[in-house]
Amino acid sequence: MNVSSITDHLAGPAAFASVIFLLAQLRQSANQEIRELIAQYNMRYLDVASRIPYEVLVEDKHIETLHSEIQSGAKRALYDYFLLCDEQLLLVTGCTYKERRFLGPLSRLGSLFQIRDVRVWQKAEKEWIAGITYNFNRFAFIQEFEDVCLKLDSKNPESCFKAIRDNIPLQNSIR
C-alpha cells in the first residue's frame, strides 16, 4: 500500500467531515443572527414600553385622563409601540426576515436541513404575539390605536397598521 492509495481512501471521509463541519458552522451563524435580531427587537420594545405612562400601561387609563403635559409623550410612545408591533408581526409572518436578511435565501433550505434552530424563532414569535394580543385587549391601547388610525387616514383607517389588524384580534375596534 503506497501513500497515494492511503490518500485516496481518506479523501472521501475528509470531504464528508468538511461538509458536516461547514453545515454546523452555517447553523451556528444562522442561529446567532436570529438571536441578535430577537435581542434587538426586545431592546426596542423595552425602550418604547418604558416611555408609556404607568397609568396607561397598567391601570388601562385613556391618555386624555392624564395631565396635559404627559399626553403628548404618551401618544408618541403608543404610536412608536404600534409601529414596532406592526414591524414585529411582519417579521414573524415571514415577510421581512426572509427577504432582507443575509441568510434569508437559506431560510427555507435551512429549515428543511435543520441548519437553523426554528425553536428559537418560534418561541420569540409566540411571546411577541401573546404580548401584543394582551396589550390590544386593553381599552386604552385600542382607543389610542383607533385615534391614530383615524388621524393617519381618515377616509380608510382600516388600512393603517395592516399587520396588526390581520393578525391580532382587536376588541371594540373598527375593522
Image (cartoon, rainbow, N blue to C red):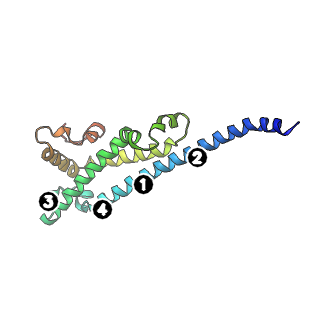
Instruction: Answer with mark 3 or mark 2, whichever residue precedes in sequence.
Output: 2
Which label's residue is closer to the chain start, 4 or 1? Answer: 1
The amino acid type of the residue labelled 1 equals: Ala
Name the residue type under label 4: Ser
Front label number (1 vs 2): 2
Q: How far apart are marks 3 and 4 (CA)?
A: 19 Å
* Picture residue at 34% right of the left edge, 49% below the top: 131
Q: Relative to residue 102, is residue 53 drawn left or right?
A: left
Whether residue 174 is visible:
no
Judging depth in this view, the residue of 128 and 28 nearest the camera is 28
Answer whether labels 3 and 2 touch (C-beta < 8 Å): no
Q: In this view, does 54 lie above or below 156?
A: below
Mark closer to the chain start, 3 or 4? 4
In the displayed orientation, state which residue is furthest to the left.
155
Tell me the mark number nearer the camera, choosing from 3 and 4: 4
Please give the name of the residue rendered at 52% of the width and 43% of the height, measured from the top-left corner.
117
Q: How far apart are marks 3 and 1 (CA)?
A: 34 Å
User: Callout 2, which amino acid?
Assistant: Gln
Residue 115 placed where, x, y %?
A: 55, 40
User: Is label 1 in a helix, a strand or a loop?
Assistant: helix
Residue, disc 4: 50
Closer to us: 133 or 19: 19
Distance CA(mark 4)–CA(mark 1): 16 Å
> Secondary structure beneath disc 4?
helix
Occupied quadrant, residue 154: top left
What mark, if any, has residue 39 been given in the picture?
A: 1
At mark 3, the secondary structure is: helix
CB under 8 Å between discs 4 and 1: no
Q: Are marks 1 and 2 in contact (CB under 8 Å)?
A: no
Quarter where residue 100 is shown: top left
Residue 25, disc: 2
Q: Mark 3 points at which residue?
A: 65
